[in-house]
Image: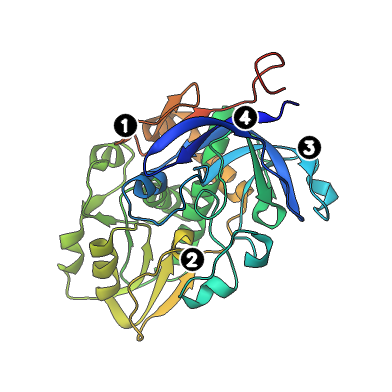
Amino acid sequence: MASTMRALIYDYDTRVVEKPLPPIPRGWVLVRVEWAAWTGLEEAIVAGHLGVEPGVVLGHAGYGVVVELGVAAPSWLASKKVAVGRLPAPYTIPSYRKRLWALIDEIAPLPGIVYNGWLAEYTALPSSALTEITISLEDEKYYALSTPAAIAMVAAHWLATRARGNRYAVVGGGLVAIMASLAAQEVYGYELTLYSSDLRWEKIAEELGVNMEHIRRLGDHTRPLAAVFIATLDAYDSYRAVESVRHDGDILLHPVYVHETPPILPRCSYRLITSFPADTGAYLLRKLGSRKLEKLVAVMDTLEKPPVPRPRPALIVKIGARKAGKGLE
């Protein structure tokens, strides 16, 4: 194995660089990346909506194979196909810095924010964040969406437990929001409306049978929301979501909110998604099938600077380590 790799880093923009293979801290593993995803979260970083240190390798979602175990990493992970399936404990992140909001004491952010992510030929990740993928898909590239699909499944299930006789919604118009609505339909048997000020994926959502409306419509109702899933970093949309929840309502937050403080109302109950097993996402991906997924996805065959704005809710990038003689084995 050579000592360098190609990686897409954040440097107030994005660029592909050649850099050394990452060190493997205690309890971490080295993963050979097969496919990685570029979604609205990465676009938000480039737009300055999410504070990220320059030099961090981007990519909160992807999948690969564990090729080396760090000291004290679980031996069962060796050679396993993995994706991020939970937020790791903060003490496992060497570069971790505490933030203001309380939940930060218990968990650390997704990869590609504080520590390096998936958009590289190899990535080192905390073993506490990884879960094994065992469910088969007809097209392996969609495994790159296991993490956002799993988050969507958790949100759809959470809303399903609060749906009977109540008003509920998802605020957000990107990949996770659309997948949450699809999970509600395909897995849990109910309809879920999305509200967002960004309607660029409205046509795609409509083709998939997902109802998406402008965030202004969220307040056009005599009954406040009993529950809402916030799947956007847009400050206005997030505030409108919280404002529309009844006095004893429940608010579910995307895992990115461990890194970003949401609008807070003391009268509401907040819950952050911290566990989202990769196989839960793979189950939804298999349920949806390639015909639906291809509407959500554009494919890049090589690791290069992604187009901004992205052409679909998700870009999935073929990574794969270079062959011997071209850098990495």
286 on left or right of 89: left
Disc on the earlier residue, 3 or 2: 3
Disc on the earlier residue, 3 or 1: 3
Residue type of the residue flagged with mark 4:
Met
Residue 244, numbered circle: none
Disc on the earlier residue, 3 or 4: 4
Q: Which callout, 3 or 4, points to the residue nearer the camera? A: 4
At a point 49% along the width and 48% down the height, the residue shown is 148
What residue is pinned by disc 4? Answer: 5
Q: Which callout, 4 or 2, points to the residue nearer the camera? A: 4
Residue 311, numbered circle: 1
Q: Which callout, 4 or 1, points to the residue nearer the camera? A: 4
Q: Which callout, 2 or 1, points to the residue nearer the camera? A: 2
What residue is pinned by disc 3? Answer: 79
Report if residue 329 is visible in the image: yes
What residue is pinned by disc 2? Answer: 258
Q: Give 46 or 4, whichever is nearer the viewer.
A: 4
Quarter of the figure with residue 10: top left
